[in-house]
């Protein structure tokens, strides 16, 4: 059975969860880590979100990403494969509360850059964040058991915000 799409009110513990997860990822992957960024809605103070901490781990190159895959799997992360564009590898850990989704990607990755633009724009523009929260609540009802549909239905809004953040609108 498909998992229910659940959007909950902001939890003030999410930043603390991120810091703990980031420390464990740094220790797991090692000194080649360039950056560990809290992305997604749980990274935006006050924004409702799925109770899932999304994290991007930036590594120097694809070879470092590929080398880290076995370490992630050995630590209990479920591999979700190559996502979004080449060289973005996703991992999910369902056994933690909150759940966590980690993306390994090489430095200079466009998907990562867009995620940072999106996060930072929402933090700087509370009205846009409120509009996004309302959209997510609506879509969570419409796509209650279709996580991929939920994500696809948010794409136009996300793309508009990224374009605004990049100054291309």
Image (cartoon, grey):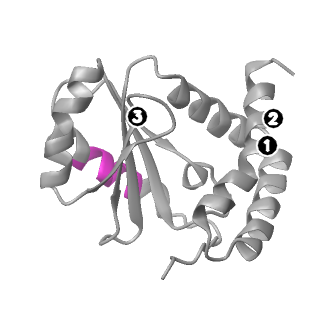
Label 1: state its secondary structure. Answer: helix
In percent of width and height, residue 11 lies at 55, 67
Residue 135 visible here: yes
Could you give the CA–CA distance between mark 2 and mark 1, rounded to whole angstroms? 6 Å
Q: Which residue is mark 3?
A: 88
In percent of width and height, residue 126 lies at 80, 47
Nearer the viewer's eye, disc 2 or disc 3?
A: 3
Tell me which secondary structure the magenta stretch mostly adopts.
helix
Q: Which residue is mark 2?
A: 160
Q: Is residue 72 magenta?
A: no
- Residue 91, placed above or below residue 10: above
Q: Residue at x 46, y 51 (%)?
A: 54
User: In the picture provided, is 79 more to the left or to the right than 2?
Assistant: left
Q: Which residue is mark 1?
A: 156
For the residue carrying disc 2, how many other residues have a C-alpha within 10 Å: few (<14), some (14-19), or many (20+)?
some
In percent of width and height, residue 158 lies at 73, 41
Q: Is residue 22 magenta?
A: yes
Q: Quadrant of residue 133?
A: bottom right
For the residue carrying disc 1, how many other residues have a C-alpha within 10 Å: few (<14), some (14-19), or many (20+)?
few
- Residue 67, placed above or below residue 60: below
Q: Residue at x 67, y 76 (%)?
A: 144
Q: Which numbered disc flags the more N-terminal residue, 2 or 3?
A: 3
In percent of width and height, residue 76 lies at 19, 60
Residue 46 visible here: no
User: In the picture provided, is 137 more to the left or to the right than 101?
Assistant: right
Q: Quadrant of the C terminus?
A: top right
Q: Residue at x 76, y 66 (%)?
A: 139
């Amino acid at each position: 059975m498909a998992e229910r799409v659940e959007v909950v009110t902001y939890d003030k513990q999410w930043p603390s969860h991120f810091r703990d997860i980031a420390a464990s990822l740094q220790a797991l992957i090692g000194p080649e880590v360039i950056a560990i960024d809290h992305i997604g809605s749980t990274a935006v103070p006050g924004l409702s979100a799925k109770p899932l901490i999304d994290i991007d781990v930036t590594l120097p190159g694809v070879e470092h990403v590929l080398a880290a895959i076995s370490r992630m799997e050995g630590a209990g992360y479920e591999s979700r494969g190559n996502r979004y564009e080449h060289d973005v590898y996703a991992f999910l850990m369902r056994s933690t509360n909150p759940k966590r989704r980690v993306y390994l990607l090489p430095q200079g990755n466009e998907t990562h850059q867009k995620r940072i633009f999106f996060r930072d724009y929402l933090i700087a523009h509370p009205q846009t964040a409120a509009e996004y929260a309302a959209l997510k609540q609506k879509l969570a009802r419409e796509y209650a058991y279709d996580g991929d549909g939920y994500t696809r239905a948010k794409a136009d809004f996300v793309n508009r915000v990224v374009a605004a953040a990049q100054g291309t609108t």
